[in-house]
Image (cartoon, rainbow, N blue to C red):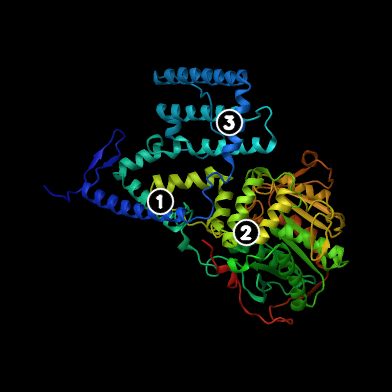
Amino acid sequence: MTNNAESKPVRGSEDRPIKVPDPVEMGHALTRLAERGQALVTEFLERQATSKDGGQIDKLNIGGAFFEMTARMLADPARLMQAQMQLWQDYIALVGTATRRFMGEQTEPIVKPAKEDKRFRDPAWQEGAIFDFIKQSYLLSARWMQSVVKDVEGLDEKTAQKVDFYTRQFVDAVAPSNFVLTNPEVLRTTLETGGENLVKGLEHLLEDLERGKGQLLIKMTDPNAFRIGENIALAPGKVVYQNALMQLLQYNPTTEQVHKRPLVIIPPWINKFYILDLRPENSFVRWAVDQGHTVFVVSWVNPDASQAAMNFDDYLKLGFLDVLDAVEQATGERECNMIGYCLGGTLLASGLAVLAAKKQQKRVASATYFVALVDFNDVGEVRVFIDEAQLAALDDKMKSQGYLDAKDLYTTFNMLRANDLIWSFVVNNYLLGKEPFPFDLLYWNSDSTRMPAAMHSFYLHNMYQKNLLAQPGGITLQGVPIDLGRIKTPSYIIATKEDHIAPWNSVYAGTQLYNGPRRFVLGASGHIAGVVNPPAAHKYGYWTNDELPPDPESWLSGAEKHDGSWWSDWQKWVAPHGGKMVAARTPGDGALIPIEDAPGSYVKQRAM
């Protein structure tokens, strides 16, 4: 006998090679993984023992929501019985069609996955009678479960939304595609590799737990495939100004003449600015430079505990007012056009309201809002994370460490699209044992930043929870109560139809708050792809309507659909606000001396 016997391929029923694993090698691999797993568990238990959360295990207040839902359901047994009977009838129909199919008949499925559902695209889910039955059985149960918890009488709106959201999280988690024995692709791979895929997947799992220090931090792409300033964020320029909170980048011109008024972009500080400069072919920064704009971009610092006291007012002062002064020094222009992306757009609107209160509003000739909320009355599913109990727990956590950890934000936003951003990677990385594909967008998505405790608490309480920004005088910044209704700056507002972070109808609400000329455009796709949509790609399309009725659905019903990118529409709108054409400006031409090459050093600080 020999312990190093060569694995011999065996032919399966479908003439695929089946690999018999070497038991010794497999044993050694599992031993190594067990040792790493034991170390992780020990570290996790030690950290739990010294945690400062007082042993609170339901910080999201999920248990209370489901307890209330259950009590309401039991108060209406007739409705529950009706739902149970419907499920029973659906299963009888499914068993009937499955039996006929096993006997060779052609049958129509009782239930089909949604067109956008990628979990069941392997041909075996349709061609194999057993896997088709498993799939349909799951879809029926999922549909039943979600219908039962939906519209429970007597449940307040916030509790109902939380129950619906976490029910869907559970339903997504138990999908048969997420398990070895009920996923045909994983089964095939396991037979073909002799289980090596599962061993490799376990290695990936432990690596992700180690990287997250006990918290599962799923690797969505190869982090070593991208280097900021080398193969992403490549637009040439200089850092011309910096303070404790941000660096200001000015980009090199590509045209002999430029618009007199410069263009300033304020990105969100939840993620980094280079979403607008991933690659040359989809870089909004490069495209805007090519249109004859002198482009400046704010690059936010990645804050740590030393910046815990930085609040929203500090961001306004250092990331908006100081930026205006710096751009004036760099170009000699008192007026500029500005863009605010997501949270950067919320800051832009707040800053314009401060300028209006101080009678300095003309410093900004036009304002463009990329998927930015200013009315937080309806924020979609993000609302499930915003209630008194959760905010209190979050405040305590932030006070103890001085910031909100990037991992927490990363996990929260991924939960909003769990099948795409969580479970697809569980299958790929852990069950199939594959390495994630190098994808620049997912690299950027995982390059989240921390949130200073004071700023994030102010933002969540005053905007998300109380919606004070939409109320005249509801918030005081830079010593003055602000009113968005006093903003007369021409506004271009872009929302995206499938946005799960800033729902388009909530973005549309800004059209009813600002004064002055306003143009609302609705792009297709979501929060990122709908914004980063270069004209050369000829993708998605967008809707326009010159009328701005109070109801967003009324706006949409009267809107005209256009092919391609909304970028061209925006350029036609913003060009007249750019002023006459002047000689192109190069970083360093003005009063500001360049500090370093773009993309600067702040953007390279990683939180995860």
Q: Position of residue 426 (x, y in %)?
A: 45, 46
The correct choice, above or below, for 146 with respect to 326 in the image is above
Residue located farthest toward the left when viewing the structure as drawn = 1
Secondary structure under the numbered disc 2 in the rendered image: loop
Q: Position of residue 24 (x, y in %)?
A: 21, 49
Secondary structure under the numbered disc 3 in the rendered image: helix
The correct choice, above or below, for 478 with respect to 375 in the image is below
The amino acid at mark 1 is Leu
**Residue linked to disc 2:** 270
**Residue linked to disc 3:** 146
User: What separation in Å lies between label 2 and label 3 (alpha carbons)?
Assistant: 32 Å
Q: Position of residue 75 (x, y in %)?
A: 63, 22
Q: From the viewer's perspective, tell me whether residue 323 is left or right of residue 71.
A: right
Please report whichever mark, 2 or 1, sits nearer to the chain's N-terminal start.
1
Residues packed near mark 2 inside 10 Å, few (<14), some (14 to 19) or many (20 plus): some
**Residue linked to disc 1:** 205
Which residue is painted at 61% across and 63% down in the image? Answer: 274
Please report whichever mark, 2 or 3, sits nearer to the chain's N-terminal start.
3
Residues packed near mark 3 inside 10 Å, few (<14), some (14 to 19) or many (20 plus): some
Asked if residue 122 can be seen in this view, the reply is: no
Question: 496 or 78: which is nearer to us?
Answer: 78
User: What separation in Å lies between label 3 and label 1 (alpha carbons)?
Assistant: 30 Å
